[in-house]
Amino acid sequence: MTHPAQPKASHFINGEYVEDTAGTPIPVIYAATGEQIATVYAATPAIVEQALSTAKEAQKAWAKMTGTERGRILRRAADIMRERNHDLSVLETYDTGKPLQETLVADATSGADALEYFGGLAASLTGEHIPLGEDWVYTKREALGLCVGIGAWNYPTQIACWKGAPALACGNSMVFKPSETTPLCALKVAEILIEAGAPAGVFNVVQGMGEVGGALVTDPRVDKVSLTGSVPTGKKVYVAAAEGMKHVTMELGGKSPLIIFDDADIDNAVGGAINGNFYSSGQVCSNGTRVFVQKGIKEKFLARLAERTGNAILGDPMDEATSFGPMVTENQMNIVLGYIEKGKEEGARLICGGNRADKDGYFIEPTVFADVTDDMTIAREEIFGPVMSVLDFETEEEVVARANDTEFGLSAGVFTKDFTRAHRVIGNLEACSCFINSYNDAPVEAPFGGVKASGVGRENSKEAIKHFSQVKSVYVRMGDVEAAF
Ligand code: NDP
């Protein structure tokens, strides 16, 4: 019998599901059991061509609609997503393995927030009037054209919406390629947009690996590429996009610092560290995986952290009591287990976890290492799994320098009751998405992105509009034209 997660077809182009079984088969594996639940096929060159030509054509009429009309469609799509939250959350759980307890509140809901927010902004994308005596300049905020979105596997619904909603609000069309690991959810986003009234072809989904992504990025018809992925992929895609002088947004990896001063509320700080390391089993780009704890409270912090981490419920992700799911794939599990071994070998003190859990599927115990030093591999490389490194520090100056000593710069957090210090420290940290006495909140109203190797451009908020549109400047002369000859 066909599994309920099996989509009608692999791709969604020009308002309908499209199949081409000549493409490489991509098995969809449910991470909690290792069972194959669906198959999709990578896009063949013919599918890529169909998606790009359709999107290019559809964009013209879409951009000519008023912002109010486009916005209404996006907001209707948001309503449909919210009505179907339960089913979409179940699909997200099948796609990623994340527990339903999380997906019910974090995935289709945040996708709907993006559709609603950018739907609301669509009608207010105006230019300005610049008087110049009798003449004037007016500006227009115009769409870029055809945008390509490429997603990572940790938030397949959210990433499709975080890219698709602002792109469409500005009058662009999009071809979106999900990660081959999680190909299911973006298809539902495409289906819902059509149901909400979006013209066929403005949001299309094609499946495939890096090869398909590469074909999309290098196509001369594409005006913008927005990637969520790792730094090495980001560098490749950025170079390829630069060849065609395309606009880019790069949402890449991190190794973010979370700094806990000795005056912090310990339970809140422990909660922040848990949210910043173990949500989605640690598969979150903005995670605060280098937890710097001021020496005076270190043992108290570790004891409370170990106690609360012991309360994580690993198990069937479809059981709403489960609070901690598996790694997305066997491969990702093995990568993370490799880092845990490295941590042990390099002399970090294991506080809790440290093993594959004794279950079917790709579960790893939530793991905390203490006495981690700045040079250890687990303190330098992005692990993308449930491995927290706790490092000690003594002074503010020291911790800021050490926190910034990384190629990454996605997020940063500070826990302290001293607000002057909190703002000063955040001001000195090299990151975009920062938190004071909190961690990992990602409301659509707030800009999200990275500095240094963690990326370029911003998603969410009004900032995202700037990255999916461009300004045209028109000089209007009322009098005669003076010329030298
Ligand atoms: P990857 O970089 O491996 O892949 C990202 C996407 O790029 C996938 O869809 C992948 O295809 C595609 N891709 C790979 N090579 C190319 C290429 N040459 N040209 C075009 N596309 C290509 O990342 P993961 O999927 O492993 O995701 C984890 C990473 O994503 C982590 O580093 C994480 O920090 C980052 N991330 C960043 C976020 C942010 O907002 N800053 C949010 C979430 C994750 P395929 O995999 O199908 O082959």
Image: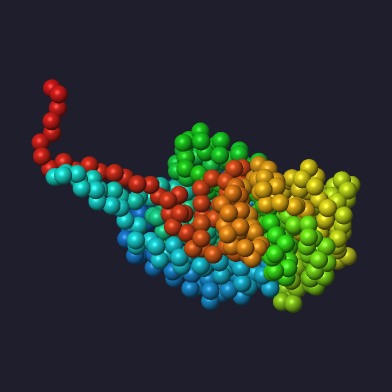
Q: Which residue is drawn at the image coordinates 45% and 54% (left, top)?
A: 463
Q: Residue at x 35, y 65 (%)?
A: 69
User: In the depicted view, which residue is nearer to us: 251 or 216?
Assistant: 251
Residue 89 place in picture, x, y as percent = 63, 70
Left or right: residue 333 versus residue 210 is right
Q: Is residue 348 left or right of residue 292?
A: right
Q: Nearer the viewer, residue 22 or 404?
A: 404
Which corner quadrant of the image does residue 299 belong to? bottom right
Question: Farthest left residue?
Answer: 480
315 relative to 463 in the view: left or right: right
Up/down of 121 relative to 475, above or below: below
The answer to whether residue 154 of the structure is visible from this angle is no
Whole-percent x, y for residue 46 in the image: 54, 45
What x and y, as percent, mark residue 314? 80, 69
How many discs mark residues in the rendered view? 0
Percent position of residue 12, x then y: 53, 57
Where does the N terminus fall, quadrant-wise?
A: bottom right
Which residue is at 35% across, 57% downward? 125
